[in-house]
Amino acid sequence: MFINGEWIELEKQFAVTNPATGEQLGKVSDGGQQEAHQAIQAAHEAFQSWSKTTAYARSAILYKAYQLMMERKQALGELMTREQGKPLKAALNEVQYGADFFLWFAEEAKRVYGETIPSARANQRFLVRYEPVGVVGAITPWNYPISMITRKVGPAIAAGCTIVLKPAESTPLCAKAIFEILEEAGLPAGVANLVTALDPRPIGTEFCTNPLVRKITFTGSTAVGKKLAQDAAPQLKRVSMELGGHAPFIVYEDANPEYAAKGASLVKFLNTGQACISPNRIFVHRNIMDKFVETFSQRVNKMMVGNGMEKGVAIGPLINETAVSKMENQVQDALGKGATLHNGGQRLVENGLEKGHFYAPTLLSNINPDMVIYREETFGPIAGIIPFDDNDDVIAMANDTQYGLAAYIYTQNLSKAMHTFEALNFGIVGINDINPTSAAAPFGGMKESGLGREGAREGLVEYLETKLGGFAI
Ligand code: ADP
């Protein structure tokens, strides 16, 4: 753990394992409420001077951290593959995406402009300035174990906030590597603190109840996000929530079914389906269904499953056994209710895969609303295809979920693209685009997918308070 500029090791520790092999990668301290309390205290003390530094000084540290991430890209990528499981190429992409947030916020730090507002009174001047909110409590998930950290720590530092981070219990080593970089980049003691823990609950409780914490930022499941938001409510702490998704992927009749199937198969199996923006309901017009399914299925056949360190592997392990069981349940339920299986449909336990948490990339068609997979976020390598006939119906079906994070549309018709873009109740919409994300673009969901946005200009505003001065002159 990294508290007040010092690396601390507790006697009580927990093991970190490789989800592809079961091999133990290391141990980290098992912190609790007391350590979270200490870290918050340190962050509070550091805030007094850090919040008064210039944006230029903060920007320089973030830029240095960006450079160090770039220098260590390969090592960080390999660490991520061993700890989280994603194929090395995907891990390297994530390190780049993660570093992009430090670079973006190093730039944005200098552009927190205030405002003067004309008054109706001749002898009055209005002045608006933005100030850092204070100490931030951050909780991050394991699926993107570096970029979800830099996406919170970057803007916090840029804004002049101080922060205490609790990373996911499955991926604390990636968090540690980022904090080593922040230390080397010259971040003063107490500005960013790392508390690792096997049981996240006492840390969440301390974040929500300690009055020194002014903001909670969380990425993870909707259930935990709601609990944290409720627990933070009595003190009216500011909250940012990036929660679950249930992304629709709409392929209209005029789309090229082969091109759309290529896109769907790439984005669906990214990170073994363990992404909140992963397509979870693939709606395909009935008239192009056969070609779409055929292309999709051929592509799935060619996907190599295995340890992400091996060349050519496209699908890594799931994070743990619970995730594998969830896949088994969703597939069994769908097949029992009439779905058609084209690929996969079982856990993989041969050729060394038995030591890890592997599930075959799976393609199901004829999914209907009675199936669990139609409603529940999959978070794994199962693609479910639903036929549709009517364009208005498909928009209603796409919106028929409590989630509202990402959605995808394939069409060659501009007016249909625009109409659908406007009609979908989702925070991120990819139009013939399977990667509508960037450090420069606002990421976040509507409805039960969350509150607030990360990245972009908006990602910095989340860490700022607005202060108005009315000057009578
Ligand atoms: P997932 O199911 O994808 O692991 P979670 O929401 O359970 O998603 O986990 C995301 C992050 O939230 C992790 O860092 C985890 O430790 C943390 N977390 C889980 N439960 C709680 C809780 N009750 N209070 C605070 N943090 C929690």
Image: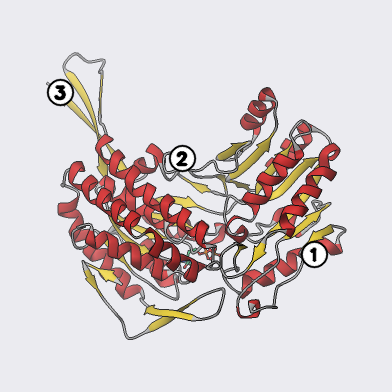
Q: Residue at x 27, y 59 (%)?
A: 182
The colour mode here is secondary structure
The first of marks 1 and 3 along the sequence is 1
Give x and y (percent) for residue 26.
41, 79
Q: Quadrant of residue 15?
A: bottom left
Q: Amino acid at mark 2?
A: Pro
Q: Nearer the viewer, mark 3 or mark 2?
A: 2
**Inter-mark Cα distance, 3 to 2:** 38 Å
The first of marks 1 and 2 along the sequence is 1
Mark 3 CB in 8 Å range of ligand 1?
Answer: no
The residue pinned by badge 3 equals 472
Circles 3 and 2: CB distance less than 8 Å? no
Q: Amino acid at mark 3?
A: Ala
The residue pinned by badge 2 equals 442
Task: Check disc 2 and report its element: helix, strand or loop.
Answer: loop
Circles 1 and 2: CB distance less than 8 Å? no
**Inter-mark Cα distance, 1 to 2:** 36 Å
Task: Check disc 3 and report its element: helix, strand or loop.
Answer: strand
Identify the disc placed on residue 333.
1
Identify the disc placed on residue 353.
none
Q: Nearer the viewer, residue 218 or 440?
A: 440
Residue 237 at least partly seen: no
> Circle 3: is it few (<14), some (14-19), or many (20+) Cα within 10 Å?
few
